[in-house]
Image (cartoon, rainbow, N blue to C red):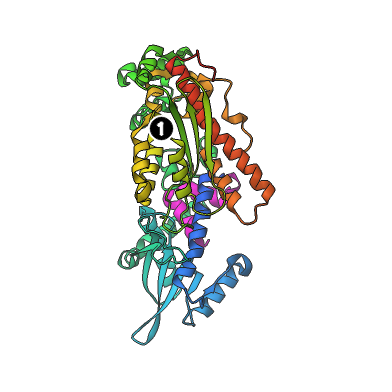
Amino acid sequence: MRTFSKSKLMALRQCPKRLWLEVHRSDLREDSSSTEAIFQTGHQVGKLAQRIYDPLGVGALIDIKAEGMRGAFERTTTLLKTAHPIFEAGFSASGALAFADVMLPEQKDGQRVWRMVEIKSSTSVKDYHRDDVAVQAFVAQSAGVALQSIALAHIDSSWTYPGEGDYRGLLRENDFTAEAFSRTEEVKAWIAKAQLVSASKAEPAIEIGAHCDTPYACGFYDYCSRNEPKPEYPVYWLPYIGAKAATLAEQGVIDLKNVPDDLLNARQQRVKAHTLANTVFFDAVGAAADLAVYSLPAYFLDFETIQFAVPIWKGTRPYQQNTFQFSLHTLSASGRLDHMEFLDLSGNDPSEPFAQALIAACGGQGPVFVYNAGFETARMGELAIRYPHLSAALLAINARVVDLLPIARERYYHPNQKGSWSIKKVLPAVVPELRYDALDGVQDGGMAMEAFLESIHPDTSAERKSQIEQQLLAYCKLDTYAMVRLWQVFAGRTDLKL
Ligand code: SF4
């Protein structure tokens, strides 16, 4: 008889084949960087929860790495006889084992009972969390713990950090006692099924499908999909194909050359036709007409932002997009191109100096071109709320914003875009000599976030910080220079030397 960890049982809930592979071929698993990031964030929030639930620091933390599995279970048994909070308490019983994020002692009828809290870094309760707490409750109760209640605490994204290390209010609790306690038989059935699945010599015959991404992207996807036919022109290149792609796949249609035209809208038909013919679509007259209404001077603007599950700056919320950098190219009426930029790597809240520098840089009139405007306008709207004294100026910039993305989408398509109008795809198609992959270090928004975090870390050397600064400046500058060159091609202004 095997003993299954909670994560193995959750793997079974996602897909029996995943559990089998976890048990027999864990070497095949390749977790994506986003999955790794979720684990890291969870760890960070878990550490903070220890401070929140144990402000006096009298609790005990079980360190499974240092103490080993058996040591962790034994010390948990000892600590359950005390009246202090326990973090990462370990239990094993009835074929399963689990570690509880938080165990809090309480008194009931003169007896010590325990309240368990599971900590999640998400901003709401997900369906799979319910299975998670059901397993936790089952294992703890089976191990003989006097479990009085169980709750799930997730991040409250509406909470604002008041500063001074005061994180009370970051987590919002949801009581799951009645539900979790009522699912004992279900959990027993999962454990029994896990025994059967893992005892099988043969890998379960389960096809890839929607379950491979729900609730997590499965790390065995590359392995499971290794023999799947690889379409030359995948259906998902069709813009906004959405659920229709799944319907087509069920009918065996995975290549867009086999998708009937009458199922497609005009833009999808255009993508299909130009992809198959390997030709460029460019409605130069239409693009020039779209842009002719905006006269020079013109501004070309892009932001970089950073998010924290646990806010580090007073007045900010969990997962808020904090602006730390902008690049702005300005094209004068005479055709002169200038560049301004802002980047704050001090580690202090960059928001207000960012907003002030932006207002100073954007002038008072002229279109402000951005690519995919919703992101920048949302950030300026948030800054306007946060800094009322800057609100009018920020909203005035917002009112001048013109989005280049809809023009690109409607007027241009190159087969190399593979169905995407992200500026990273459009730029090398329209202006082949400009490439993001030629940049040193930072080449996309995710890398910019990682670079920012590294640069503000106290252990980062001045030399490395300087290198990151140059990489961030070069990356963001390319974003706005890319817009300038797209504007030039779309506006038909090849007379300008840009
Ligand atoms: S990739 Fe899909 S089919 Fe394969 S183990 Fe994971 S969930 Fe199951």
Question: Taking 255 as reference, is 43 above or below it?
Answer: below
- Give the residues drawn in magenta, as a range: 1-28
Which one is nearer the viewer's eye here, 90 or 141? 90
Question: Taking 248 as reference, is 67 above or below it?
Answer: below
Question: Taking 309 as reference, is 431 above or below it?
Answer: above
Q: Is residue 482 left or right of residue 320?
A: right
Q: Is residue 17 magenta?
A: yes
Which one is nearer the viewer's eye here, 343 or 62? 343
Q: Place residue 184 in its image quadrant.
A: bottom left
Q: Which residue is denoted by mark 1 in the rendering? A: 372
* Residue 308 percent across, percent down from the top left: 47, 53
* Residue 311 percent across, percent down from the top left: 46, 57
Q: Place residue 183 in its image quadrant.
A: bottom left
Few, some or many C-alpha atoms within 10 Å of disc 1 (few <14, some 14-19, many ≥20)? some
Q: Secondary structure at mark 1?
A: loop
Q: Is residue 332 magenta?
A: no
